[in-house]
Image: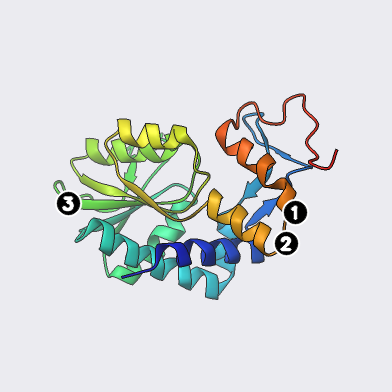
């Protein structure tokens, strides 16, 4: 058995330590969508740190075995889920495939790369879950190809209610090694952020599309 809460905090620690995640509650980032965000996450950076990469690979593999049972193949979501998926497939000794963002415009026109065998039980690997939209597009592509999707596993989730709603609607289970709540708890406990910023950070998760619009962000003002 693995201790989920310990893993959530350890992964949060690693992601902050290597700056895969940056927290700036009073100087927010702007996403491509135009949303203001106190957090920036780039889990590709984990690949450059062998200790972190190994821990994530091992814990994802362990979580998959415990939560989803026996599977036949691992599928990565292009692009950031591909290297993580390869690592997990290697750890479990399983075949690997990946789902492209869109079908090839030449050759076979493939949407899924690798050997696809109808009826195989597959777990999908992502690096990050926000609303779950791109992840679930990959899930649907795999289902359309005749595979049975046991679920999806990712390194981190922002914990948006919209993601839970989308995965529930798609009838797809998912798990993550860490999450936004564990991250800000760890960050506050270790003085990476001021504890006075906790409320501000919590409000973002509940209403990310409107957070920071026309408001004074500093909790000290």
Label 3, on which residue? 120
In the image, is residue 206 above or below residue 39? Answer: above
Residue 151 spot, x, y in % from top left: 29, 48
Q: Nearer the viewer, residue 126 or 109?
A: 126
Local SS, label 3:
loop
Residue 153 visible (yes or no) = yes
Give the mark nearer the N terminus: 1 vs 3: 3
Specify few, some or many for label 1: CA neighbours under 10 Å numbering under 14, 14-19, or 20 or more: some
Real-space CA distance between mark 1 and mark 3, rounded to the nearest whole angstrom: 48 Å
Q: Are marks 1 and 2 in contact (CB under 8 Å)?
A: yes
Q: Nearer the viewer, residue 210 or 21?
A: 210
Label 1, on which residue? 194
Real-space CA distance between mark 2 and mark 3, rounded to the nearest whole angstrom: 47 Å
89 lies left or right of 180: left
* Residue 60, picture quadrant: bottom left
Image mark for residue 180: none
Residue 19 visible (yes or no) = no
Identify the residue at image location x=81%, y=31%: 216
Local SS, label 2:
loop
Image mark for residue 191: 2
Identify the residue at image location x=62%, y=30%: 33
Identify the residue at image location x=56%, y=34%: 206
Extreme-right residue of the structure: 221
């Amino acid at each position: 058995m693995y201790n989920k809460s310990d893993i959530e905090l350890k992964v949060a620690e690693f992601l902050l330590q290597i700056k895969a995640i940056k927290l700036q509650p009073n100087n927010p980032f702007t996403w491509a969508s135009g949303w203001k965000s106190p957090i920036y996450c780039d889990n590709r950076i984990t690949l450059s740190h062998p200790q972190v990469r190994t821990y994530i690979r091992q814990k994802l593999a362990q979580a998959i075995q415990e939560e989803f049972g026996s599977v036949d193949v691992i599928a990565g979501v292009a692009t950031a889920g591909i290297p993580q998926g390869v690592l997990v497939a290697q750890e479990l000794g399983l075949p690997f495939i990946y789902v492209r963002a869109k079908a090839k415009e030449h050759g076979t026109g493939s949407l899924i790369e690798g050997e696809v065998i109808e009826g195989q039980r597959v777990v999908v690997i992502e690096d990050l879950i926000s609303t779950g939209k791109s992840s679930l597009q990959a899930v649907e592509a795999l289902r359309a190809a005749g595979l049975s999707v046991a679920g999806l596993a990712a390194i981190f989730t922002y914990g948006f209610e919209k993601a839970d709603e989308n995965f529930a609607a798609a009838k797809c289970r998912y798990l993550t090694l860490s999450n936004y709540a564990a991250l800000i708890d760890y960050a506050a406990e270790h003085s990476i952020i001021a504890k006075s910023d906790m409320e501000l950070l919590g409000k973002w998760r509940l209403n990310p599309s409107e957070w920071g619009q026309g408001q004074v962000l500093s909790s000290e003002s």
